[in-house]
Image (tube, rainbow, N blue to C red):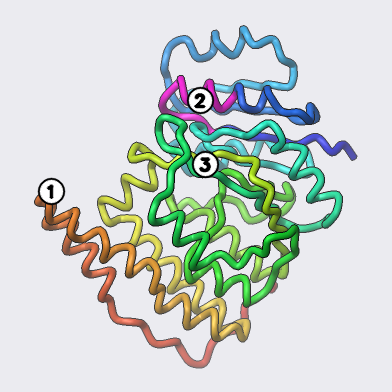
Amino acid sequence: MTDTLDIMLPYYGDPALMRDAVRSVLAQTDPDWRLTVVDDDTRPGVPEWFAGLGDPRVRYFRNPRNLGVTGNFRRCTELVDFPYTVMMGCDDLMRPGYVATVRAARAEMPGAAMYQPGVRVIDGEGRPVRTLVDTAKRRLYSAAPDRRARMRGEALAVSLLRGNWLYFPAMCWRSDVLKEVGFRTDLTVVQDLAMTVELLLRGEELVTDPAVCFDYRRHRASESSAQAVSGSRFEETRRLLIELAADFDALGWHRAARTARRHLSTRLHALLMVPGALRHRRLGTARELAGHAFARVPRPARPADPVVGR
């Protein structure tokens, strides 16, 4: 079977950033990839730009109607054909060695459901940037060693629940599990955590590689940033973690269940955002954030039902 990497690019937003993302794929040192762009926007000139690329490895589709973030991710998943997939952000950048790096990781440690290479964080202008969130990911939460390694099970789940240190747009997924698990219609900004933990519950593995080969763009215009400011991100996160805690208890992963119910890192993140909300006189948002930070830790249900099929 071909080892071509399916690079899916669900697109909506700034055409200039999207074009930069596409050019970063075209610049890969390993040419064995296929790029599929699924346009959920209606901006003029975009179809014409793709028609002028003249590269048979690039496919372009425009949705006849707007599907939204989750709907477009699901559409991208339907179009996947090859064994491994990347769901790239339309404002992120692959560094030239990305495809070669994930191919080498798969060759050395085959069969994993997820591969996470090293990531550099950039701002809206493409400059390297250090943020509090990303510093915490690396120094407080990340369990990835400084070498290529396999990870799995409850220990990895606990690490991710303390603080999700993965970068979803940079991850390479085994296509069969990506299609099987899919993107939930009731989630928007924590799809990555839901999918990753579901795969761990199924016994799948994550491979990490410290080689930095992807630029993840963090700026205020992103969907996750907008929802964090409004407070809705934290409500969605709390709902997911309480659900996962029940699954962990059913599997006997009680340490992971306790970590999910406490969700200390998201509480701290919400608390740190309260002063900003007050400064901008967003009193309703400040109450939402404080409510998340100080919410009561729910008690586990007893007895727990077994997790069917896991």
**Residue 198 located left or right of residue 302:** right
Vertical comparison of 10 with 306: above or below:
above
Q: Residues within 10 Å of mark 2 (few under 14, many from 20)?
A: many
Q: Quadrant of the N terminus?
A: top right
Tell me the residue that label 3 is attached to: 216
Task: State how far apart marks 2 and 3 are (Cα).
Answer: 13 Å
Q: Nearer the observer, disc 2 or disc 3?
A: 3
Vertical comparison of 210 with 29: above or below:
below
Q: Amino acid at mark 1?
A: His
Give the quarter of the image for residue 155: bottom right
Tell me which segment is drawn in magenta: 10-22
Q: Secondary structure at mark 2?
A: helix
Can you tell which mark lies on residue 18?
A: 2
Q: Position of residue 285 (x, y in %)?
A: 19, 56
Give the quarter of the image for residue 306: bottom right
Q: Say if the magenta span includes residue 6.
A: no
For the point 48% across and 44% down, the residue is: 70
Q: Residues within 10 Å of mark 1 (few under 14, many from 20)?
A: few
Q: Earlier in the sequence, mark 3 or mark 1?
A: 3
Q: Position of residue 133 (x, y in %)?
A: 41, 56
Main SS of the magenta segment? helix
Q: Are marks 2 and 1 in contact (CB under 8 Å)?
A: no
Can you tell which mark lies on residue 280?
A: 1
Can you tell which mark lies on residue 77?
A: none
Vertical comparison of 69 with 62: above or below:
below
**Residue 4 located left or right of residue 91:** right
